[in-house]
Amino acid sequence: MTVIDVHTHMFTTKWLELLKAEGGMYNIKTRPDGQREIFRGDTPVVLPQAGHFDYDLRIKHMDAAGIDISIVSLTCPNVYWGGEEVSCRAARESNDNMAEAQRTYPDRIRWFTSLPWEYPQRAVEELERTCANGASGVMVLANVSGRSLTDPFFAPIWAEIDKRKLPVLVHPTDPPGVDMMDMTKFDLSWSVGFMFDTTLAFTRMIFEGFFDKYPNLKMIASHGGGTLPYLVGRFEKGDEVELAERRQMKRKPTDYLRHIYFDSITYNLGALQYLISVVGAEHVMLGTDWPHWVHDTKGAFANTARLPQDQTDAVRFANARRVFNL
């Protein structure tokens, strides 16, 4: 059995320095506990840890936890800042660092490419370059600087990803309006806002017929899909009362939920079991969110260990091995 972690992150020092210099609304603030955190204005975004920058430390963590392969990705705010050239530089910096890590640890590291989505032609070029350089999939935030992923502006990128049949990890960031919704305190932008961001992104995809247009995509909804599984009844009722002339999807909402893949980061066994009851164990893959301050490596193993053995095997390795052709 090979344990595969599909949701785990890495930064680079140069990426962080570029963000500090060219990040615009992004800034670094010191928390009450002395740690330095990335903010968007007054909204906390991500708290860099030593493990974000050190692959040797990552391998030690993987060995101690029992993780054989980590499919690493950049996280929010990704590269959606600084203008075209800065965004492209940030993408190349992160992607080349991950490609080098895979060459250094060929049996342990795989990676999702990050793209300058705000510049579709440049994004397609970076996709081509990084796929040739060993990328296993694509990482995208659930909104790109406030823009919906289903916006026709991004169609050239999605068409290329669909043609390549690539897995896509959709990771939340702070949703538009967090300031107006008073989510800047108590990390509500993380506990509530992130879940909202993922849920809204995938709900749009379902109801706009996105999966009918791009049938080859292997979309992965972060953090157990946000609230997608819990809302399945509302989706079905909403579709039932929808006006026929407005309906865009060809199947039922539940069918699309069972088309999407999900990670296991729920922090709660009951939530993981419910997710599986809705979408099936064959659509859930192990995630830890390491090395974030809120990572749950122990929980990932403890919760999956309490599933029936066939589900444990599916979540921990079999599904990822199939999806990523490992």
Image: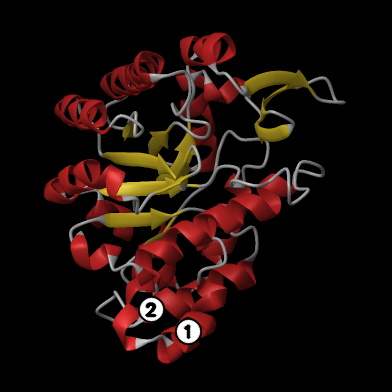
> Which residue shows up at 45% across the image and 85% down it?
236
**x%, y% of residue 113?**
31, 32
Q: Which residue is mark 2?
A: 253
- Callout 1: 10 Å neighbours few (<14), some, many (20+)? few
First in sequence: mark 2 or mark 1? Answer: 1
Tell me the amino acid under the disc marked 2: Pro
At label 1, the amino acid type is Gly
Q: Quadrant of residue 137 in the image?
A: top left
Image vertical order of residue 97 relative to residue 248, above or below: above
Q: Work out whether residue 274 can be spotted.
A: no
Residue at 18% x, 58% y: name it: 216
Name the side, left or right, on which 94 lies relative to 8: left
Q: Is residue 299 left or right of residue 96?
A: right
**Badge number at residue 135:** none
Examine the rendering and report whether any part of residue 168 can be seen: yes
- Residue that label 1 marks: 238
Q: CA distance from mark 2 to mark 1?
A: 9 Å
Residue lying furthest right: 32
Indicate left or right for 86 with 11 as reference: left
Name which quarter of the figure residue 218 lies in: bottom left
- Residue furthest out toward the front: 245
Q: Secondary structure at mark 1?
A: helix
